[in-house]
Image (tube, rainbow, N blue to C red):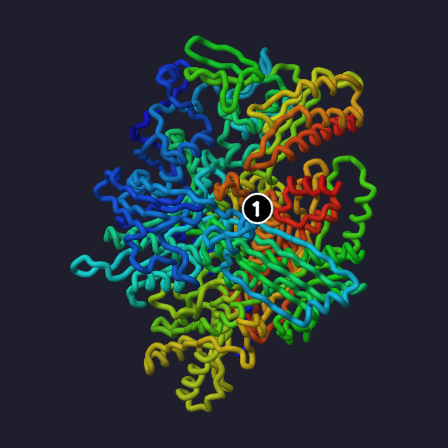
Amino acid sequence: MTRAFSPKTLAEAQESLARGATKVAGATDLMVADHASGREHAWVLNVMGIAELQGIRVDEIGLNIGAASTFAEIRRSKDVALHALALIEAAATIGAAQIQNRATIGGNIANASPAGDSLPALLALDAQIMLAGPQGRRTVPYETFHIRYHKTVLEAEELIERVVIPLPAPKVQAFRKVGTRAAQAISKVVIGLSASRRGDLLRNVRLAMGGVAEIPIRLRQVEAIIESEPLSRELADAAAAVVENTISPIDDVRSTASYRRHVAGQVVRRVLLDLLRGF
Amino acid sequence: MNKRNAVGQSILRPDGLDKTTGRALYLDDLPENGCWHGVTVRSPHASAVIMSFDVSEVNDPEARVVFAKDVGRRNSVHLIHDDWPVLAEARVNHVGEPVALVAAPTLARARTAAQAIAITYQEQTPVLSLDDALAGDPRTNGRLNVLAECAIEHGDAALGFTQAHLVIEGEYSTGHQEHAYIEPHGVIATPALDAQGAFTGIDIVGSLQCPFYVHKALTYLFDLGPNAVRVRQSVTGGGFGGKEDYPDMIAAHAALLARACGKPVKIVYERHEDIIATTKRHPSRVRHRTGVARDGSLVAMDIDVLLDGGAYITLSPVVLSRAVLHAAGPYSCPNVRITGRVLATNTAPNGAFRGFGAPQTLFAVERQIDRVARTLGIDPFAVRRRNAYREGDETPTGQVLTESVSAIAVLERAAGATGFRERHAANEIARQNRKDDGQPLPGIGLSLFWHGSGFTGNGERRMMSKGALRLGDDRKIEVLSSSTDFGQGTEGVFRQIVADACGVSLRDVVVHPPDTAAVPDSGPTVASRTVMVVGGLLHRAGVKLGQTLCTFAAYQADLAPASVILRGGFFETVHARTPFAEVAKAYLTVHGPLTVEAQFQPTPNSTFNEETYQGDAYAAYGWGANVVEVEVDPDTFAARVTRLTTVSDVGQVIHPVMCAGQVEGGALQALSWGYLEEMKMKDGRYVNDRLQTYLIPTMADAPDMETILLENPTIHGPFGAKGVGELPLDGGAPALVQAIENATGIPLCALPATPERILEASRFLS
Amino acid sequence: MNSNYKFTVNGRPVEVTGRPMARLLDVVRRDLGLTGTKEGCGEGECGACTVLLNGAPVCSCLVPLFQVEGALVTTVEGISPSDQVSELQRVFATEGGVQCGACTPAMIVTIRALLDRHPKPTRDQVREYVSGTLCRCTGYERIFRAIEVFTGQRKAEGVSETAVDEGPPP
């Protein structure tokens, strides 16, 4: 029989975390899995009411997003719109209204799907994940947070408290999702890109991709190529070719490895060409 | 008597407000009243021999388990051929095949008990695709396992090819489609027990299209008399053919459990179970050889149709029949040979799906016509216009189209309304000089199609459907038929037809809910036959009922019978106007309730030979043309339909809004079959067996639609109405694929036109 | 362990005893008898189970009971007062927004929430906001049109039965 807790503070949450409670945020994935399997949890912890996980603000450490923020809240946030357009665009592609009203950024991160829509945006924006546990707080870059297929460094007794995007945020940001239909579709490939710009050179490029490996990945080789010379059509073509040669996507129910490889390259190319047009 | 008042008006559908307020009760909303819950144990294998059953681990003392051995001698779904077991006995032929049933007082207990049943199997090599099937089936000692076949010969195809300027070949294929009605299957079976508790009959309430199909299946299964089985329809949340055949199965299951436990038993499928267990649209492979003259006229057509029937025959012979009868498209050709076969595979049986074989063969012929156009350098409109049926033309079955032929009219209207020819040509030119700017590639595509209304060939003659009207003590005219409403608006259009046939007000007409104990067998609600065939019966009954009352009114007033007419709810004579209710009351006082029944009457001199496939295949045809506009993303090859223009002739439109709704809803199902919906299989298992992975269109995928209804009446339907239900499924996919070709230059021959498939084809081309 | 949860449904305070992870869908349908909310897929894909949670549409099959404590829930039964029909519901029925009806309660609930945010939505706003509620019957065109008629952007096509009955013979 399941016992449930709905704490108001992190401190109050500690006891149930120590008992190994299942953390429940927007529950949009959890409820599907529970219903399909018929499994019962011994302890469940509602993280949605925990004060420290609430709210979106800009403070001394950056654009500081509570882990319990829903994607609907993120889409409405003026602060996110100002600093992290890629994340707004990602939020808009997650499920439809019903899902965006429930699903949280913390949940999307903790669930650690290879195709999680917000994750490439967070990776591109160098998001820092603030974790709270019995030993206190620690901050882990998203880049090292997600380690394997559906596996993260989050300890059982820890919670994702906040997601911080360092400021000033990159001036150049892009997000693209290739889904299976126009709305409410799980991704085939998701791409996030951030960079700064000097003249017609892109610097500090972070190119992140989901759906092409067991976790969202950065394409460092491609980043290096993009930074290597002024942006041009030739550079975009070269980047696309390297994308296709670097990634090793798989065939699954949503798409084929061959298509993913192709489309990943083409979409990166298009992102670069669109930037070039804006220069 | 043919005065129209209600017909042609978009009145509020009778169930409309119950549905918008949530008051309408679907199967799972009905009070459970202590009913038990049934679950089904299914085969995990595509082909296997059942070695053993073991229930020793079932610990629930109340749980009841039913195996094939408990069913009795008549262990089959009694549909066309008795090859489809209600429960698998010695072997299983597809993944998800029912093997055992469990009932318990709660759903959770029934599930627990079901999990405790151990069944062992010895697996065999399955036949999982048409390719496998063509290589020979182990179940028939390596020979082809043909579930049904037929052929049509018209003129001399061999001779025709020798006279052709060019012979063009093509092969086209389509995949499984899931109905994805929003309400999954559900049924409640209540047993009738005698004083000793012995089983004497069964009462079924279910989400279903064909109450008398279920009635027939259960009287057969239990060897009961017709009065011992009663089947009623609950409010049904969509069917599209998916609730034509499969309710026989689920009702049989619930009834078997009800007999075993002596309690009412409810079975409601969750979505996942619904997808893995129930029938799908037949996958197809159609080969065309077409001989054409220099000007694009068709000289000879040789068409071979292959359908994947799945594990059992179910409705495949009639699906094949409709498939081949539509296979040459709405085009006149002097020499035609069409052959068709359904092959067995080890996948869930494929069955009825709106369109019933015609969308598959019409996709193929429309793509083949496009290939002809491309080869000859003619535009897609011109080649269709040249060959489309005119009045007086003869179909491959030798049927002379003598009336209500609108192929040219719908084609010209569709092209005119969209500027098709100019835009198609402009896109072709633009494609040659395209800038690499990431802008979506525009494409426009056109299709022309036809669909026979009512049963194929002698189907209606065999069915001899009945419909009736009853003037009861409440002075209302009650419609008695077994036609079901699962969204189409049947109840409303029947009221309109009857009101005008009789000459009464809509408020004087009510519809009895489908109930085999209370209505005559009007046949199943399938095959675009409800308005034309059953509506026609009700129209005749209505006219007769009106005449009877007029004669009565005349007699009462001491007038000649012909001097009274019933119109607009009043009995009119030269001198007076008497309200309907007043005369009805007098009639009821004198004679009591009046029931007028009408039975199907075959058209004189119309015949169809089922051996030679010659004769009148359908009494009337609906005609349609679609223009699909797409934008294809140059980087991802994702196609987005931006606009759909449909022109349909379904004869007199009874209810414009609902008729348009049929066209639009069917068209979106057709479009998404064309580019989105694909049941993927691995080892005989559907891989995308949930709505998260089997995708149907959302609102964001839906184009704006312009729906044009041309009304070319037929003499075969009430007020000139033809069938509308299935026609809209026929034209979306080919027009969409042509539009993609117009945008990208990539001609696809297989559905769905997913970005993956377009990419593959583009690589093949380059 | 069953616990008591207090929340408000359609303006009425309720107290429900149940498992904390019980689906709000089952609570609404079975415990509260509000069967207007339908189960179409059980995994948040079809949206047939949509209710408003504190005014925002959610899939009730994905909401665990214990998170509803203190919340305001609106089901289709709360869209119009009992035994009445709101204008939106009437227009939806007369303009062809309804066919089989299995998605209709969810459509009404979702569209109600849309109209609270965009009183005269464009089609693209409708597409964006309502894309989580699937309809298999209509092709969506008559749903768009019903919304447009309701918001005064389009002329009604439906006619009343009384007008037909009382109208002059053609």
Q: Which residue is mark 1?
A: B677
Residue B589 relative to residue B158: left or right:
left
Q: Dividing the picture into quarters, in which one does residue A185 lie?
A: top right
Q: Residues within 10 Å of mark 1 (few under 14, many from 20)?
A: many
Where does the image place residue B125, in percent across and percent down from the top left?
47, 45
Instruction: Look at the image and tell me whether residue B4 can be seen.
Output: no
Where does the image place residue B149, in percent across and percent down from the top left?
54, 63
Where does the image place residue A66, in percent across and percent down from the top left?
51, 20
Q: Chain of mark 1?
A: B
Residue A46 relative to residue B255: left or right:
right
Q: Closest to the observer: B295 or A50?
A: B295
Instruction: Look at the image and tell me whether residue A261 can be seen.
Output: yes
| Extreme residue in the top direction | A135
Looking at the picture, does residue B235 appear above or below residue B722?
above
Q: Quadrant of the C terminus of chain A?
A: top right
| Extreme residue in the left direction | B196
Residue drawn 52% across the image and 43% down it:
B681
Q: Dividing the picture into quarters, in which one does residue B270 lie?
A: top left
Residue drawn 37% across the image and 61% down it:
B217
Residue B51 relative to residue B605: left or right:
left
Q: Mark 1 falls on what kind of element?
A: loop
| Extreme residue in the front direction | B141
Q: Quadrant of the N terminus of chain A?
A: top left
Q: Dividing the picture into quarters, in which one does residue B464 lie?
A: bottom left
Where does the image place residue A91, in percent across and percent down from the top left?
58, 29
Figure label count = 1
Q: Please name the amino acid that badge 1 sits on.
A: Glu
Q: Closest to the observer: B219 or B100?
A: B100
Residue drawn 40% across the image and 32% down it:
A34
